[in-house]
Amino acid sequence: MCDTFVALPNSTINGNVIFGKNSDRPQGEIQDVVVIVAKKYNSDTTVQCTYISIPQVEKTLAVILSKPRWMWGAEMGANEYGVVIGNEAVWTVEAYKTKGLLGMDLVRLGLERGKTALEALHIITSLLNKYGQGGNCAENFAMNYHNSFILADFQEAWVLETAGEYWVAERVQQGTRSISNNLSIRNSGDLRHPKVIQYAVNRGWCTGDDDFDFASIFSEGGFSESLSIDSREGRVRHLCRVNEGKFSIETAQSILREHKGNICMHGAYESAGSQVSSLSQDGCQHWFIEQPFPCQQPYKQKSCLVDSVSVH
């Protein structure tokens, strides 16, 4: 129940990559903005994610995260190299595991370990392949889903969509791109799980590369390309597209505060946090809201640039 978008330099006023996301969480859940310093670890260190422990890397990057307080992972954030990532819940035909890495864990791991958007993408897909995704995604009731992501740095942006262990990734070529709570990549993407097409062929879902359609094949309940401008996904896509060529930080913030289509969400689920980032080679800037309802709160500029420490 979130929305994430990115605008490439050819569509922004300042010539930067602009990223935005609202984090829509169950009503009353607390979401914090936290800075975690870069750290060095011994070779035998493990990291306890929300439900499972995995080996820690030798060095993690400094990050700023917008995260539900109860979980280890994050809905969105940025790191010291200017990489930003946001995730979305998606529902697919693949089985849901009761224990694994949450999509939010993968967001944090990608940011703590990836110096570029593409490197973070490879890190996430490698972890997905090794540990799988799964586990309850809500604090006080049962909710399990798979995940899609937008990953960006000042040079490029990627959409990564998953269904269980399978995934495809598409590089954003120009203009704007948004994702919501549905799969959206209609082909095999620019990168993919090495066995995803054969897996689909073996189940009679396609005959090969030519008719492989990730979103259509893996979407639970079927896939429809037709999106009403009054729907949340359709409204975000529309507002991004009509602002191409004049997209600004203010544009991003106004989209995330929009009530039409329930982009700024109130109710049983609510927009508990929000992030807007402007990414350039000369420096990256990040603005966060860490209270519910972006329509009622100011964005505050924050940074993750702090000194590193060693952990033994």
Image (tube, rainbow, N blue to C red):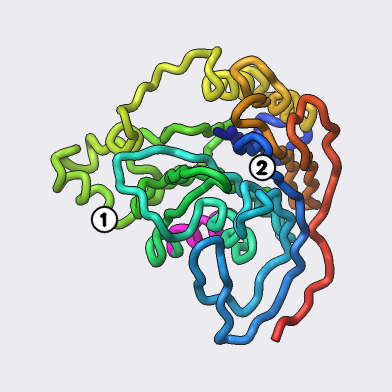
**Is the residue 183 above or below the residue 134 in the image?**
above
C-alpha gap between disc 1 and disc 2: 38 Å
In the rendering, which numbered label is found on residue 29? 2
Q: Does the rendering let one see residue 38? A: yes
Q: Nearer the viewer, residue 260 or 72?
A: 72
Q: In the structure shown, which secondary structural element does the residue marked by tag 2 occupy?
A: loop
- Of the 4 image quadrants, the one containing the N terminus is top right
Q: Position of residue 287 (x, y in %)?
A: 80, 42
Q: Position of residue 230 (x, y in %)?
A: 55, 13
Q: Quadrant of residue 47?
A: bottom right
Which residue is disc 1 drawn over?
195
Is label 1 or label 2 in front? 2
Q: Amino acid at mark 2?
A: Glu
Magenta-drawn segment: 118-126
Q: Nearer the viewer, residue 130 or 79?
A: 130
Q: Amino acid at mark 1?
A: Lys
Which residue is located at x 36 percent, y 46 percent?
A: 163
Which residue sits furthest front?
Answer: 140
Q: Does the rendering let one see residue 158? A: no
Which residue is located at x 40 percent, y 47 percent?
A: 162
